[in-house]
Image (cartoon, grey):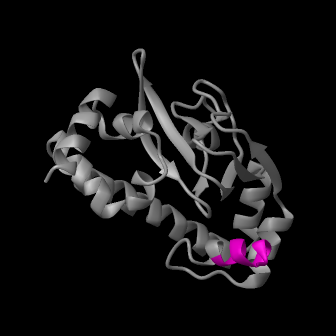
Amino acid sequence: MDTDTDFRDILRNEGRFSPSDTLIDRLLENSDEISLKSGKVLIGYGQTDTNIYIVKDGIIQLLYFKGEKEVTFGFAFPGTFMCSPQSVYMNQPAVMQIESCRIASSVLRIRRDVFFSLMRESHEFSLWMFDIAMGQFYTSECKMIQINGSAEERYRNLLKFRPDIANVISANRMASYLNVTPSWLCKIRKKLLYE
């Protein structure tokens, strides 16, 4: 199996816009790979990081803090573009933390200046990034609709709409994502097991 070809296919299929091989090659040539151990922070809360990242392998968690409580906002899988919008757009510290999840991960890093040069130089790249941004807005909206209702309804919706998350994320992270305690999640799981 050719992992480079597989990853190119993942990038090509990340949104509705299909970038050319030449454009994907150009993006990959302008990035460097970073390996992350399980639980390793890529962008820490309060850190200013103006780079753009693409998940190459593994699962990345996006979280924020509500007082002392860690709240999981979402997860990123291979092909997902991510950054701290606060840092990239406003050069301010991140309000979300981005870290490797349960398994080791790798990401590609593109420096902000390189990313914006590609935007200025390539209409195709700009269209691709607009498509990626719209896809992420769409996903956020779907999350608001699907992960809604009572704790049990949110869990059922997670199993229905995002089984990829439910199958690989620890119970603690899943509970945080659903905004319930781990013990409450355990009760819901037991109840559904006996249905």
Q: Which residues are magenta?
A: 1-9
Nearer to me, 153 or 81 = 153
Residue 45 lies in the magenta-colored region = no
- Identify which residue is drawn at 61% across, 64% down: 79
Residue at the image position 69 percent from the left and 45 percent from the top: 104
- In the picture, measured across the screen, residue 145 lies left or right of residue 143, that is left
Q: Locate residue 189, reporting x and y percent.
A: 25, 43
Number of marks present in the image shown: 0
Q: Magenta residues: mostly which secondary structure?
A: helix
Q: Residue 17 is drawn in which quadrant?
A: bottom right
Residue 71: quadrant of the picture: top left
Q: Is residue 123 visible?
A: no
Report x, y in % for residue 25. 81, 75
Name the residue at 31% across, 40% down: 178
Q: Say above or below: 9 vs 175.
A: below
Viewer-proximal residue among 13 and 175 = 175
Q: Could you tell me which quadrant the N terminus lies in?
A: bottom right
Q: Is residue 52 above or below residue 122?
A: above
